[in-house]
Image (spheres, rainbow, N blue to C red):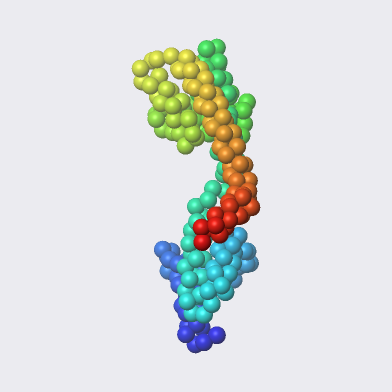
Amino acid sequence: MTPAEVLLVASLVAAAIAVGVRGRPARQRLAILTVRRPWRPNPMRLAAGLGGFAVALFVGGLPGLVVGAVVAVILERFLRGLEPAEARARRLREVADLPLAADLIAAGLRAGAPVDHAAAAVAEAIGGPLGERLARVARALRLGAEPVEAWGHIAPVAGAGRMAQAAIRSSASGAALAGALSRLADDLRADHAVAGEAAARRAGVLIVLPLGLCFLPAFILAGLVPVLIAVLHDVL
């Protein structure tokens, strides 16, 4: 490795350390750089580093180091933007449990239970991540929080914003919340059915696409190329 390449590698390492400790207090920066901690590989950084290393080997030389470093940074940012499997499973379970939760809360309200008691009972019944959110909603309502603040705990769930809006309108205008939640549950189930059908159609297209990519070159080579060669032979 030439002196210029060694200098570039050292600069990249120094830049990585600077980025890792940037924005921290001076005492914390010193602790990060001096305190020994057990090394634990970061899968995203490891994959990004391997990708950058492969590109550097492929390009070669000083340009390879530069391109590899850029590729490693881009890969790490891309991988960080991907949704973790645990978060995705949590999100999907919340979306799947939302229609049932709306129906159960509506049933509790029709039975005469207050909103906070109905939400707490449903949270205990369904459990899971949505149950945790509903438990926070019930606790906030019981402690006297504003409906906007209390129902904001379930707002991040896809489709739950309509539930929160219905509850807030009901608290402000006295409208019946049970009927709104029942209609919301029906709408959510219809949306899930439409999304499932769209996913099934999309899966069919994605399954056919690799087959087309495999058979199309063979069809061109075996069917069209001999015909074109014969035509060109007759013309020329």
Nearer to me, 166 or 158: 158
Rendered residue at 60%/37% (across/down): 204
Residue lying farthest to the left in this orientation:
173
Above or below, 235 against 142 in this view is below
How many marks do you count on the picture? 0
Residue lying farthest to the top in this orientation:
111
Residue 116 point in image, percent of width and height = 50, 23
Above or below, 39 against 78 in this view is below
Residue 124 point in image, percent of width and height = 61, 28
Residue 148 point in image, percent of width and height = 39, 30
Q: Would residue 41 appear left or right of 17 to someone viewing this image?
A: right
Q: Is residue 90 visible?
A: no
Rendered residue at 54%/77% (across/down): 60
Q: Quadrant of the N terminus?
A: bottom right
Residue lying farthest to the bottom in this orientation:
3
Q: Which corner quadrant of the image does residue 96 belong to? A: top right
Rendered residue at 64%/52% (across/down): 222
Residue 71 point in image, percent of width and height = 50, 66
Rendered residue at 48%/58% (across/down): 77
Above or below, 29 against 193 in this view is below
Q: Is residue 231 visible?
A: yes
